[in-house]
Amino acid sequence: MMRGLALACALLIVAAWPASGARAADVTEVPAGVGTEAVKAFKRGLELHKSKQWTAAIQEYERAVALGGRFPEAFNNLAYCYRKVGQIDRAIELYKIALQLRPTFPQAHDYLARAYLAKGDRAAALREYEIVRRLDAKLAHCLKTAIDRNDPDYNDMPWASSSGSP
Amino acid sequence: MGLKLGLSLDTVGAFLFRLAPASVFLVHGWLKLLGGHHDRTVALFLTVGIPLAEAAAWFVGALEVLGAVALLTGVLIRPAAALLAIEMAVVIALVRRPQGFLGAWEFEFVLLLVCAGLALRPAPAPRG
């Protein structure tokens, strides 16, 4: 009985470790449960984001988050825009939500480090750098330079990714 | 109901019920140990605040590989299954719960249902 129960428990919750990381690595994939209206709002936000219309982009991303719920890219990009308008605490809060939804999201870790740097918390920025280093070496190199220069905006590559997560 | 090879449906079902999680744990454990996903696992552990992330990643990888072997062979199956269940409970609490049911769980439940369906059968009808 106990053996069967233990096996059933193991099977019930098996494979939850995201070892393959396939979903986490593919930021172009719309997460399950995110509706089309949320994606549309996200894409509108992205266009505004690319043209650096931060306030308008924030409105669309807020809509995407409200409609989409668990949408890490939307939280990440929304946080980015808040960082750009100087609302660093709000940005940090949103990056943390993005990372709850996708703990191995390299861009969110990178930008969270930059947000900490903008707040003057170099130690926290370096902690995030240690994570980025394990996820994306190229991104980590840029981030380290930004930390060394104490410049959160240095080469933050807003358009380098075609993934929808600038 | 018995099969012609002398294997009962119970035996085959029970083996499949062990094979399914064993194969998943084996692959994931191997990836963590030697398959190039060690750094990603450490990053995950650092993100969710698991202490001694580097050592914990090695430990979890080894646990999954050895646990899979135990599930397959039946040796020390009860403690191995319990440890794996504890590990997965930690994963769900720290990592998967915020992602929601659709975000992370759907595949695992399909796997569960398929294997349970193969392993289980109705109670035999009373002889009369």
Image (cartoon, coloured by chain):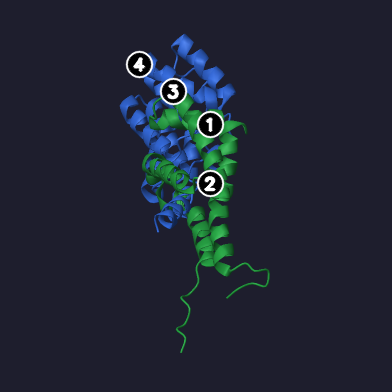
Chain colours: A blue, B green
Dot 1 falls on which chain? B
**Is residue A140 toward the left or the right of residue B4 in the image?**
left
Residue behind mark 3: A128
Q: Is residue B17 visible?
A: yes
Specify the farthest residue to the bottom.
B128
Residue behind mark 2: B75
Q: Which mark is residue A121?
A: 4
Q: Kindly indicate whether the residues beneath marks 2 and 4 are on one polypeptide chain.
A: no
**Is residue B97 toward the left or the right of residue B73 in the image?**
left
- The span from disc 2 to disc 3 (Cα, nearest Å) is 41 Å
Residue at image point 50% right, 72% down: B121
Q: Kindly indicate whether the residues beneath marks 2 and 1 are on one polypeptide chain.
A: yes
Of pointers 4 and 3, the one earlier in the residue sequence: 4
- Residue A66: where, in percent of width, then height? 36, 47
Residue type, mark 4 in image? Asp
Residue behind mark 1: B40
- The span from disc 4 to disc 3 (Cα, nearest Å) is 11 Å
Residue type, mark 1 in image? Arg
- The span from disc 1 to disc 4 (Cα, nearest Å) is 25 Å
Q: What secondary structure is found at the residue carrying circle 1?
A: helix
Q: What secondary structure is found at the residue carrying circle 3?
A: helix
Q: Which mark is residue A106?
A: none
Q: Kindly indicate whether the residues beneath marks 1 and 4 are on one polypeptide chain.
A: no
- Residue A144: where, in percent of width, then height? 51, 15
Q: What secondary structure is found at the residue carrying circle 2?
A: loop
- The span from disc 2 to disc 4 (Cα, nearest Å) is 51 Å
Residue at image point 48% right, 53% down: A11
Residue type, mark 2 in image? Val
